[in-house]
Amino acid sequence: MRRSLLALAFAAALGGCAEPEVERPNVVFIVCDTLRADRTSTYGHFRPTTPNLDALAARGTVFERAFAMSSWTLPSMSMLMTGEVKSLADPSILPDHVHMAESFLDAGYDTAAVVANPILNGRLGYNRGIESFEIDRAEQMSWTADEVLGKGLRWIDGRAGGERPFFLWLHPVDPHHPYEPLDPRGFEPDAEEAVRDAARAALEAQRADHPGTMLADRLSDEDWETVQGIRRLYDSEVYQFDLALGHLVESLEARGLLESTVIVVTSDHGEGLMERPSLPDLKHPEDEAPDLYRRHGLMLHDEQVRIPLVLAGPGVPRGVRRSDWVQHIDVVPTLHGLCDLPVKRAQPGRAMFDSATAESAASGRAAIFAVCARSHSVTVDERWRLHLPKEFRRKKFGVQPELYDLEADPDERRPIDDPARIEALTALIREWEQAHAPVSLGGTLDQSTIDTLRSLGYGGEVERKNLPAEKAR
């Protein structure tokens, strides 16, 4: 064996063709549904919600300004899993878009997924390229993160032979509404007075701008106590996910797989935790009072689209925190680069560890776009953000574009009156919208999928063009 290795090394040194095959790393791709970045201790939350993610981050790279391209699961996951852009909140993976699992399968990987969100199903294309696809088919999401990640480990252990590398997509849903942690963490109450003051001021402004749309007259102490309880429950579910993450990392290490595995932890979108008024054209369910927005899918502010993105493993710099702005569409080319996968066609994202990308990061991102059923947004120069309502909202409800200076107002509380900038950014969105409109939709949603969405509390998040014709009329 020693002679063979020496001969191989000698041939390689002479420029011969007998080179060893590149050993590709495994990939564990974890998408924690509805996990907003700023409720993790990794991203500065005052509660210790993610000690295990903190530890993973210490041995990898944290992207501090990572953004989803939609604020609800289906269009966001479509762009994350394909690296392709859609300017319509279309729910399916389009026929001409390649699911990342298909690329791994073609490169000789074993592929599997354990998905706790029932809307990410095969009818919409989310199982493409996945040999073992296990999904929670309950009307209400029932699998905890511990179950999801545990099922993933059992799949790893049960692979025949195990000589091929693997790609495993794990999709827990613990921070998703309703917030019902198995063991409420019991985090100490915190008044979060700055959040309360900003919410109160925003409610007063909205009542003045849209009289007659708000239910509550004021944000009382009792109201805010309810809000605090909701926010603590959300944090407990984040902690519940983090415990499962810690067990997964320990289990990979015990199996001797940790050093040969790229681990990605991210989310499909964030969550509104009642720090911002509800939309003036939105019906207010009783459990949403006092008119503060909870859940996701109808807005594109930071709490809805800023998500965690942590990578660790072979090829990933250790102990690094990067402040350049990245998007979901950057994940596919990054994994292609880390795993030496062939690129079948040019994609709009960029490999985040490519040397050219690192050099260009300092100059900033030209524009960051996002879309949901009710609006588009664009952020330019990492500073100016415009929220542009869809035309039906402008005509029917009089909802106007809102421009924010994120440098002076990072929480997007004080819209700016700058008609020239609004006009320029509106034109930019229109250009992007036209350039990335789907050539053909993946099909309208069938009644079964619509029923599942409604059982999970969705409705207005669905783009009108994706509804059956009678619903659209």
Image (spheres, rainbow, N blue to C red):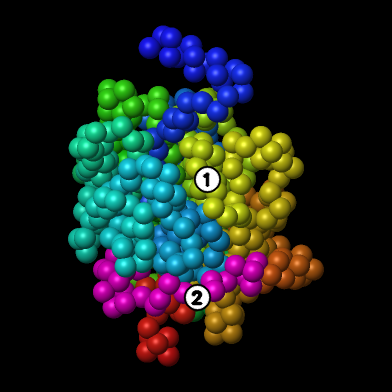
Q: Is residue 436 magenta?
A: yes
Q: Is there any visible trace of residue 184 in the rendered image?
A: no
373 relative to 228 in the view: left or right: right
Q: Is residue 365 left or right of residue 389?
A: right
The percent coordinates of residue 44 (x first, y second) are 50, 35
Name the secondary structure under disc 2.
loop
Question: Quick check: 306 left or right of 445?
Answer: right
Q: Which residue, given by chain and number where applicable, does mark 2 sit on?
A: 440
Q: Is residue 436 visible from the viewing direction of this image?
A: yes
Tell me which numbered mark, 1 or 2, is placed earlier along the sequence. Answer: 1
Q: Quadrant of residue 288?
A: bottom left
Q: Residue at x 41, y 52 (%)?
A: 102
Query: Quadrant of the rendered structure where residue 470 is?
Result: bottom left
Q: Which residues are magenta?
A: 432-458
Give above or below for 43 relative to 344: above
Q: What residue did someone put label 1 on?
A: 342
Q: Quadrant of the N terminus?
A: top left
Callout 1 amino acid: Pro
Residue 160, magenta (yes or no):
no
Tag nearer the camera, 1 or 2: 1
